[in-house]
Amino acid sequence: GTGLELDEIFRLFPRIKVTGIDLTESMLRKLREKHSDKDITLICGDYFTERFGECEFDCTVSFQTMHHFSHEKKLGLYRKIYESLSSEGIYIECDYMVLTQTEEDHWFRENERLRKEQGIGEDEFYHYDTPCTVDNQIMLLKSAGFSSVKQVFRKENTTMLVAKK
């Protein structure tokens, strides 16, 4: 996106090097304009298909994006993120998460129903919220290899998790 969360990160760590990825060139252009004085590498692409490398990053951050994907897609991406982190690396995710399995099941069923109704393929991106439970998010991150995952913030359904390699 436009790096809203980077405003605060750069305030705390003004000299960090950042690599950002987004599907939309216009979002990246706004990010570059807003932080033109920072060390930023931007990639216009899909984080499911872009290569992240191994042990490239000390920290990866995701804000409000993972609630659109199935458990399987997330697990694959979390494994890529895990591999891209240095040995002491951390992953920070802030996203929309629900508390009960009943809520999660409802959103995934509704997504499936709408896709069928509109003829949208399973691999085709459809902007619809399918939040997982906090427990399922933690389980997925641990299944991807993270040694510890902790919830560090929650306000309404906005939840922040920190996963350590």
Image (tube, grey):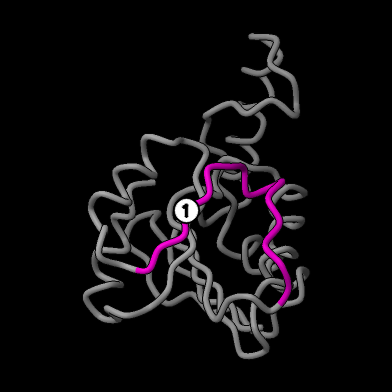
User: Can you give x and y, in whole percent of width and height, for residue 157 in the image?
Assistant: 40, 54
Q: Is residue 95 above or below residue 114?
A: below
Please name the residue shown 39% across and 46% down the image: 1
Quadrant where the C terminus is found in the figure:
bottom right
Over which residues does the magenta segment extend? Answer: 39-54
Please name the residue shown 65% across and 84% down the image: 86
Q: Nearer the viewer, residue 99 or 36?
A: 36
Residue 4 quadrant: bottom left
Label 1 sits on a secondary structure element that is strand
Tell me: 25 left or right of 44: left
Asked if the stretch drawn in magenta spans residue 83, the answer is no
Please name the residue shown 62% across and 17% down the image: 114
Q: Which class describes the residues within 10 Å of circle 1: few (<14), some (14-19), or many (20+)?
A: some
Please name the residue shown 74% across and 57% down the image: 75
Residue 164 quadrant: bottom right
Q: Residue furthest bottom?
A: 88
Q: Amino acid at mark 1?
A: Leu
User: Can you give x and y, in whole percent of width and height, for residue 87 in the image?
Assistant: 68, 89
User: Can you give x and y, in whole percent of width and height, for residue 120 in the image?
Assistant: 68, 16
